[in-house]
Image (cartoon, rainbow, N blue to C red):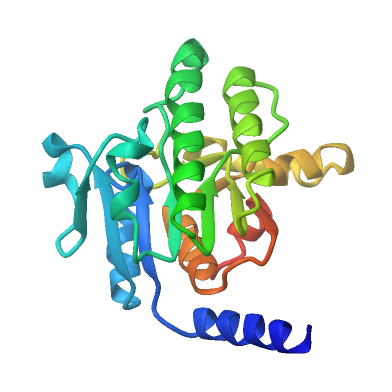
Amino acid sequence: MINTLTKKHETLKIFNNHSRKIFIAGGTGYIGRALIPELQKSHHSVQCLVREKSISKLPYGCEPVLGNALNKNSYKEKIYPSDTFIHLVGASHPNPFKSDQFRKIDLVALQQSVEASVESDIKHFIYLSVAHPAPVMKQYIKVREECEENLLQSGLNVTILRPWYVIGPGHRWPYMFIPFYKLMELFPSKSESAKRLGLVSLKDMTQTLIDIVENPAEGIKIIEVPNIRSHP
């Protein structure tokens, strides 16, 4: 038993101290396009699952893996030698009228990614979820909760991020709500909800994701908005 535990500890120590080999599903989206160059600056190598027509959207130096996020068999053989899987797939511009897409895209893609990761012996799975509960987007949140439950049952080491809305270039209209959030945080009865459903910046997200990549979870770790916003 001691030898087994020592070997496991040494394996984890090695994993915790080398540059990551990262496989990203959903890397051509808003967060993925900002994240990939930052990962590369931190000396991590990146593969990205992509359809052929979207290869031009990938940042320079990212290795494209042609495949379909809704079909693990189209890409699972190409995951190795990656040790970290980042899942960013979701219906574009989610709104309450896309409940059918949430089930057919968000849920199915996550299920396929999890199965492919288990079969590929991925050491750390990172999932971009959403803050919940929340007063709107109930079907979106319900699907994300199902995705999280799938991960909890997978046996993988998992980190789950739960932002609400990410602001940045092209996503600036929510800035008008910042004074409202600040006001709500002053009221004890509203403070927790205001912080949990607070806005986060694109820079907050990329920095948090890099920290997660470089400090992998053992078991399950969930990161809410206040911790995403804690970066300087």
View extreme (right): residue:
188
14 or 41, nearer to the observer: 14
Residue 196: image location, x then y, percent: 70, 44
Q: Is residue 198 left or right of residue 106?
A: right
Q: Is residue 189 above or below residue 47?
A: above
* Residue at screen point 31% across, 48% down: 27
Picture quadrant of residue 40: bottom left
Q: Is residue 162 above or below residue 20?
A: above
Q: Is residue 158 left or right of residue 205?
A: right
165 or 174, nearer to the observer: 165
Q: Is residue 104 left or right of residue 7?
A: left
63 or 5, nearer to the observer: 5
Image quadrant where one finds the N terminus: bottom right
Q: Is residue 69 left or right of residue 160?
A: left
Residue 12: image location, x then y, percent: 59, 79
Q: Is residue 180 visible?
A: no
Q: Is residue 62 visible?
A: yes
Q: Is residue 193 above or below residue 95?
A: below
Residue 202: image location, x then y, percent: 42, 52
Residue 207: image location, x then y, percent: 47, 65
Image quadrant where one finds the C terminus: bottom right
Picture quadrant of residue 133: top right
Q: Is residue 180 above or below residue 203?
A: above
* Residue at screen point 59% across, 35% down: 147
62 or 225, nearer to the observer: 62
* Residue at screen point 50% across, 74% down: 214
